[in-house]
Structure formats: structure tokens, C-alpha cells
Amino acid sequence: MAKETSKNNIQQAIDILIAARDAANDLLTDGLQIRSNHTLTQLINGLSHANGINSGGSTTAPDFAPITHIFGAKLEVESKQPVANAVPTSEELSDLQEQVKEAIPDFIISDAKALKGNYSDLIVRGVARAAGMDVTPTTPAKISLDFIRQVKAAVIEKDKQIKESKAADEAAGKLNELVEREVTEEDLLKIPYLAANGIKVGDKVKLPAKAETK
């Protein structure tokens, strides 16, 4: 019978992968650093979920507006080594945008400590920007747990606003659905084209469920 892996062993594996990711970030630059960080982060997240770190929440990404830019054209690739070309290629930028999109759900369900361990500073800044915060590749200078909590709060607030806006749009759409009903005096006052076309009180026509002023 196969021996079940303990949570302690899983956590040790997570710590090893985090250390490996940090070491790779120090050694690599540009697109290679982004791809290495993305791959190792996915492994770390998978083990974290298996270990119950992020349990109990949805992993569906909120419907944020599409990410078209990360800090504009002057995005700098995070690295402790000198970078000859700080402007990413379109492929590198696409990779980064995808990582930011995939990270957003975790900022709703995970705590700041787990987020700091699972995502690079560059991804945290990208999520902050997607949530509407005023950040750049160098401001704030340091990604602290307090800043990550602010990013988490901004992501949750934006997700809430998006859901409320969708609910309001759906409610408005239902109010304006056309239904066949008798015309009232209020309809004639609020919808002038009715009287102009000879429609009278009591006539049955298709009108919005709630009359709107034209």
C-alpha cells in the first residue's frame, strides 16, 4: 500500500521549489526568467492547493477588463542582474499578462503570506495595476506584506464592483423587456410616440415592463 505524503513533506517540497524559483530569478533575465518563474509558480500553487493552503474558495478569475499593458511600454523585467534591454518583447509581455490573469483569483482567496511566497514582485505589481492601483515597476520600492494586503483588498473591491454592475445591468435589462400589456395614461405621457400613432389607453401593445421617458 502506497504511503500517503504528509502535509509537512508537501510544505518542505513547496519551500524547496520557492528557493529554486528565487535562485532561477537571480540567474535568468528577460523571457527566460518570466517563463521559469511562471512554471515554478504553477508547481508551487498546485502543491499549495493540495496542502490545503488555498482551500475553500473559487479559482475562477474575476471578469476584469482585458490586460493590454503592464506599466506601459517601459516595463522592466525584475532581476538582480543588469538588464541590457528593459523593454519586453511582445511574446514576453503576453506571458506576463497571462501570469497576472491567472494570479488574480488567488488574491481573492489566499492570505498575504501565501501570496508573497507564491508570486514574484513583478506579478504582484501587475495584479495591483489590473486592480486599478497606481504602481510602477519601481513604486513601491519594496513589496511588503502590507502592500500585498492592499492589493488583495483592491482586487476584492473591484471584483465586487464588477458583480454589482453586472447585476444592475441584468436588472435594467429585465425592466426594459417588451411585454404585451394595456396602455395606461402614464404610458401616453412618458412615451409620446404612442399617441402620435393613434394608440389609446386600453389598447394592447408591446411595451417595456416599466415605461421610460423618451
Image (cartoon, helix red, strand yellow):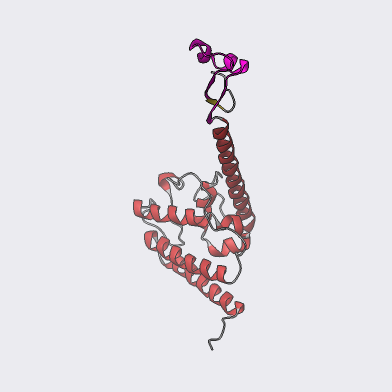
- Residue at x 35% of width, y 54% of height: 91
Q: Position of residue 73 (x, y in %)?
A: 40, 45
Quadrant location of the N terminus?
bottom right
Q: Position of residue 21 (x, y in %)?
A: 48, 68
| 136 to the left or right of 57 | left
Q: Position of residue 182 (x, y in %)?
A: 58, 22
- Residue at x 60% of width, y 41% of height: 164
Magenta stretch contains residue 145: no
Please name whichever residue, 96 or 134, is drawn nearer the observer in this view of the structure: 96
Q: Position of residue 95 (x, y in %)?
A: 40, 56
Please name whichever residue, 147 or 177, is drawn nearer the observer in this view of the structure: 177
In this view, 116 is above or below 15: above
The span picked out in magenta is 177-206
Please name whichever residue, 184 or 73, is drawn nearer the observer in this view of the structure: 184
Magenta stretch contains residue 196: yes
Query: How many numbered marks are there?
Result: 0
In this view, 44 is above or below 156: below
- Residue at x 51% of width, y 68% of height: 46
- Residue at x 53% of width, y 11% of height: 195
